[in-house]
Image (cartoon, rainbow, N blue to C red):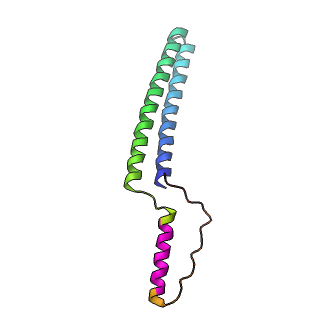
Amino acid sequence: MKKDIAEKGVLAAIGLALEAKDGLDKKIEELKKDGVIDEKEAKKALAQVKRKYDKESKVLEEKVKTQVSEVMKKAPAITKKEIARLHKRIAALEKKLTGKKAKPVKKSKKKAKKRK
């Protein structure tokens, strides 16, 4: 879940950067259309915007990857094996307390994500 939130943050940041780039592209085209700059200057400006966008996108992506990695290290997800082990411990404790076998736990229909 934390990873999903981080991924959504990455996508939002990239979306904002792309929107800003598109806005600059449109402004350059308007300047060209209005005769403020010529074709050569427009191409040069567009190339600069693209280079800057590509560079900043890579920097942003690396920063986000680092942050997500740090979050995942600090708050690791529980694995299926750990859940199964806890269910067995609970069942053993219930049996010890009540003398009866614990009711089986219903399996979730959702598939758990595997940890890397």
Name the spot of residue 98 as percent of width and height, x first. Answer: 48, 90
In front of the other: 37 or 11: 11
Q: Viewer-proximal residue, 6 or 102?
A: 102
Residue drawn at the location 56% of the way across and 60% of the way down: 112
Does 16 appear above or below 51?
below
Q: Residue at x 44, y 88 (%)?
A: 97
Q: How many marks?
A: 0
Q: Is residue 113 above or below residue 86?
A: above
Instruction: Write the start and end of the magenta stretch as one range.
Output: 82-95
Say if the magenta span includes residue 86: yes
Q: Note whether residue 38 is visible.
A: no
Q: At 48% across and 86% down in the image, what residue appears?
A: 95
Magenta-colored stretch includes residue 94: yes
* Residue pictured at 50% horizontal, 11% vertical: 41
44 in relation to 27, above or below: above
Observer able to see residue 84: yes
**Residue 48 in picture, x, y percent from top left:** 46, 19
Which residue in the rendered view is the most extreme toward the bottom?
99
Residue extending farthest to the right is: 109
Secondary structure mostly taken by the magenta-highlighted segment of the chain:
helix
Above/below status of 57 relative to 70: above
Q: Position of residue 91 (x, y in %)?
A: 49, 80
Point out residue 102 in the picture as x, y percentages from the top left corner: 53, 83
